[in-house]
Amino acid sequence: MSAAIDTWIIVADDAAVGGLIEFARMRAGRLVAVVAGRKSVADEVATAGVDRVIWLGQPPEATPVEAFAPEVARLVGEGLPRAVLGPDTTAGRALLGAVAVRCGGPVFTRVSALELDGDRVVLTRILFGGIAECRESVDGGPAILALPSGGHVIATGIPTPVEQVEASPMTNAEVVDRRSAELVSVDLPSAPMVVGIGRGLKAQADLTLIEELATALGAELGCSRPLAEGVDWMPKERYIGISGQHIAPRLYMAVGISGQLQHMFGARDSEVIVAVNSDADAPIFAECDYGLVGDLYRIVPALVAALKTPR
Amino acid sequence: MRVVALYKWAPNPQDAQVDPEGIVDWRRATEALSEYDPVAFELARGFADLTGAEVIGVTAGGSAASSSLARKTVLSRGVDRLVLVADDRLKAADSTTLAAVLASLIRRIGQVDVVLAGVSSVDVNEGQVSMTLAAHLGWIGLGGIRALEATDQGLRVDRDVPGGRETLTLAGGAVLTTVADAAVPRRAGMRDILAAAKKPVDVVELDDLGVPAAHVVVSRVATSRPDNAKRQHVIVEASEPAAAAAQVISALRQRNVL
Ligand SMILES: Cc1cc2nc3c(=O)[nH]c(=O)nc-3n(C[C@H](O)[C@H](O)[C@H](O)COP(=O)(O)OP(=O)(O)OC[C@H]3O[C@@H](n4cnc5c(N)ncnc54)[C@H](O)[C@@H]3O)c2cc1C
C-alpha cells in the first residue's frame, strides 16, 4: 500500500496510549510499539492490534523511564520509520528528544493531521498556543510527534508477541522514594457543565460562593492555572488550558478569569461561554457568548438566585 | 559547582496579530522574560546559596536576547552571569536546533553540574527544548521538579509524577524542568538591578559554535488562521446584578443550554 506511513509508537511505562494508536492507525501503515518500562505495560500494548511490540526489558525498580532515552533513540534510528509518535508528557518528551537528536529533526507538538502527499509526509499543526495553523512537509528523516496519549488501549483479539531486546538504561538516576498522592478523580473533559474560577477570587474561603453556583448549575468546578499552580486553592487536575484540561461542555461559565489564550485554548470547544469579569476590557469578553461586566461577589449570588427561580 | 538556568526572552502570543492567511505579526508583542523561567532561577539560587555554586543563565534567542533590558531582567533575579547567543536566525529555530545551540554553549562553560529550566516558554509553549538538550548532552532529562539539594554523591531531587511524588538521587549531569509552583520568584529591587549591570555577560557568535545543520528538512507548505467558534458577544453591564443575571439565565434557558 503506497499511502501508508510506517509508524513507531514510543511507550513510556504507561499503557494508556490508545490515542496514539488511534492516530497512527488512520495512516494504516505498519505499526511498531517500542515499550520502555514494565513488562505488564508491554503486555497490555501487545493486545492493541499493533504489528510488533519491542520491549526494552524489565528495568530495575529504581530506574526512571527517562533513563531509557538513549536506547529508545538507538532502536528508532535503526528502524528508520516515517513517523514516530510518543506521549506529550515530560517522560514522553525526554524519550522523543533523544529520538530527535539521533534523527536530526524536531519534535512536533499539537499536530492534528499527518498524511502522505505523493511521497512526502505532511503534517498539520497549530502554532504559538493556537493563534495560527500550518502545514509542513517533512523529508530526510521521520516526523517525530508528541501527542496527547489518550486513554486505555482497546484490546483487539490475539496479542502480538512481545520481543525483548537487550537494553541498558542510564544508571546515574535512582528513584529512592515514591509516594502516591490522594487521587483526584474528576472528569472535566466530558462534563456537560463547567464553572471556572480565576484570580478574581480574593480568598480561598470564597470558593464556597463558586461551589454554590456550580451546584445550582449541576456543573463541575474548574479553574485557571494560577489557582492550581500558584496559590494552590484547587487541585492541579482541575485547571483548564493548553497545559491543563481541555473541556467541551454545553456551558462554560468563566468567573474572574481574564481569558488569556493559554487558558482559552482549553475552553474553545465549549458550546456556550458565559464570562463574569469586572474589567470590561478583559480579553475573555471577545471570546464569550454572554458577558456580565461587574463584581463577581455581587453577580455570582444573583446568578444562583436566578437559577433557583423557576422558568 | 555550577548550575545553569535556561531562560527565554520571548513575546506573548496573546499580544500578536494574526492575519486571515495565518501570518503572525509580532510587532505589538514586546519580548520579555518567559513567565516560568524565574521559577528555575529561584530554585537555582536557593541551591547555590546553600552550596556555594555559581548560577549561570544561558539562552539562545533572537538579537533582543542581548539587549540591556533582557540582561538586567535576568541578572537581577538571582543569576550570577550570562552566556548567550543572540542571533535573529534563531528566532524561528526548531526545538532540536535550539537545544543543539544550548548544548554547545553549555559545553563551552566547562564543568556544569546541573541544568534547570522552566516548564515551557510563553511563545512556543512545547516544553521540548530542555528535554532534547538532555539528549544532546547525553544526560538524563527529568520533568516535574519541585526541589533539589546537594548530597555527598551528587543531587537529590523531588518531583511530581502522574499519581504522586518521587525522590531521586542523581550522579552526573541532569537537565531538570521545574513545575510552575516549585518556588515563588523574587521581585527585583533597585539594588538587584544596579548590581545586575556589573555582572559578566559572555555573548557568543552563533557561527563560532559550529552547530551542524539538521538532517530532517521541514518545509512550510501553508499557513492559516484557525477559525474559532462564532460567539454571540452579548455583553451586559451588570450594575443591577439581579436583573443582569436573570437576563443571561433566561437567554440560556431559551437556547436550551439549561
Ligand atoms: C507557557 C504557559 C502556559 C500556560 N498555560 C496555562 C493553562 O493551561 N491554563 C491557564 O489557565 N493559564 C495558563 N497560563 C497562564 C495564563 O497566561 C494566565 O496567566 C492565566 O490564565 C491567568 O489566570 P486568571 O485569568 O485567573 O488571572 P488574571 O489574568 O489575573 O485574571 C483575573 C481576572 O479577574 C478579574 N477580576 C478581579 N477581581 C474581580 C471581581 N471582584 N469580580 C470579577 N472579576 C474580577 C480581573 O479583571 C481579571 O481579568 C500559561 C502561561 C504560560 C506562560
Image: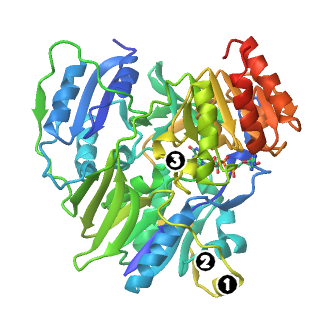
Q: Which residue is mark 2?
A: B75
Secondary-structure class at tag 1: loop
Foreground mark, 3 or 1?
3
Direction from residue A28 to residue A189 in the image, left or right:
right
Residue B148 lies, in percent from the top left, at: 36, 69
Residue sitting nearer the eye, A51 or B168: B168
- Residue A234: mark: 3
Q: Is residue B93 visible?
A: no
Q: Is residue B237 visible?
A: yes
Q: Amino acid at mark 3?
A: Met
Secondary-structure class at tag 3: loop
**Disc 3 with disc 1 on a shared chain:** no
Relative to A50, say whether B183 is above or below.
below
Would you identify the image quadrant in which residue A166 lies? top left
- Residue A301: mark: none
- Residue B197: mark: 1
Secondary-structure class at tag 2: helix
Contact check, label 1 and label 2, Cβ < 8 Å: yes
Quarter of the image that includes the C terminus of chain A? top right
Read off the chain for label 1: B
What colouring does the structure picture have? rainbow
